[in-house]
Amino acid sequence: QVQLVESGGGLVQTGGSLRLSCLASGRNFSRYAMGWFRQAPGKEREFVGTINWSGGSTYYADSVKGRFTISRDNARNAMYLQMNSLKPEDTAVYYCAADLLAAVGSSDPYDYDSWGQGTQVTVSS
């Protein structure tokens, strides 16, 4: 198993930016896909985006496309989510996840094996 720890959440005004980090423990980080999901109060967990093993391919939900960017640094066992032009509807707990069996990730949360504890992002209007 892989242990994941998110950080970087906080309170920001509409139009602002935040950068989330996800640090992974263990070996072989560079071999598997990673993803970001979010969950707002009273709603189901929602796919945000995913990045493949090398960082060369990303895929985003339509709701964040053009505003959010996922990257990874395999030398540091880290993944990042740069969030720009934030909106109140982006308010949620953000989770990073690892798909240990795939080099290319999916949008289905059930494909992911390990999850972080989440970090709160609040966007004020």
Image (cartoon, helix red, strand yellow):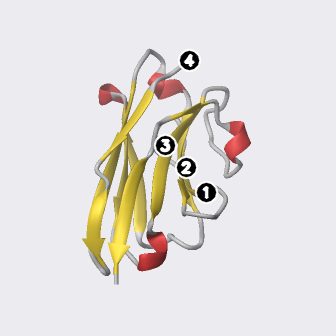
- State yes or no: discs 3 and 2 in contact (Cβ < 8 Å): no
Extreme residue in the front direction: 42
Give the numbered dot on residue 1. Answer: 4
Q: Earlier in the sequence, mark 2 or mark 4?
A: 4
Q: Residues within 10 Å of mark 2 (few under 14, many from 20)?
A: many
Give the SS element for disc 3: strand
- Three-letter amino acid code of the residue under disc 3: Cys
- State yes or no: discs 3 and 4 in contact (Cβ < 8 Å): no
Q: Is residue 14 visible?
A: yes
Measured Cα–Cα span from mark 3 to mark 1 = 10 Å
- State yes or no: discs 4 and 1 in contact (Cβ < 8 Å): no
Against 55, residue 3 (above or below) is: above
Give the numbered dot on residue 50. Answer: 2
User: Label 1, on which residue?
Assistant: 47
Q: Residue at x 65, y 36 (%)?
A: 112
Which quadrant does the C terminus fall into?
A: bottom left
Q: Position of residue 86 (x, y in %)?
A: 37, 74
Q: Earlier in the sequence, mark 3 or mark 4?
A: 4
Left or right relative to 125: residue 92: right
- State yes or no: discs 1 and 2 in contact (Cβ < 8 Å): yes
How many circles with numbers are drawn on the protein?
4
- Three-letter amino acid code of the residue under disc 4: Gln
Q: Earlier in the sequence, mark 3 or mark 2?
A: 2
User: Label 3, on which residue?
Assistant: 96
Measured Cα–Cα span from mark 2 to mark 4 = 19 Å
Measured Cα–Cα span from mark 3 to mark 4 = 14 Å
Q: Residue at x 59, y 72 (%)?
A: 62
Q: Is residue 17 visible?
A: no
Q: Nearer the viewer, mark 1 or mark 2?
A: 1
Which quadrant does the N terminus fall into?
A: top right
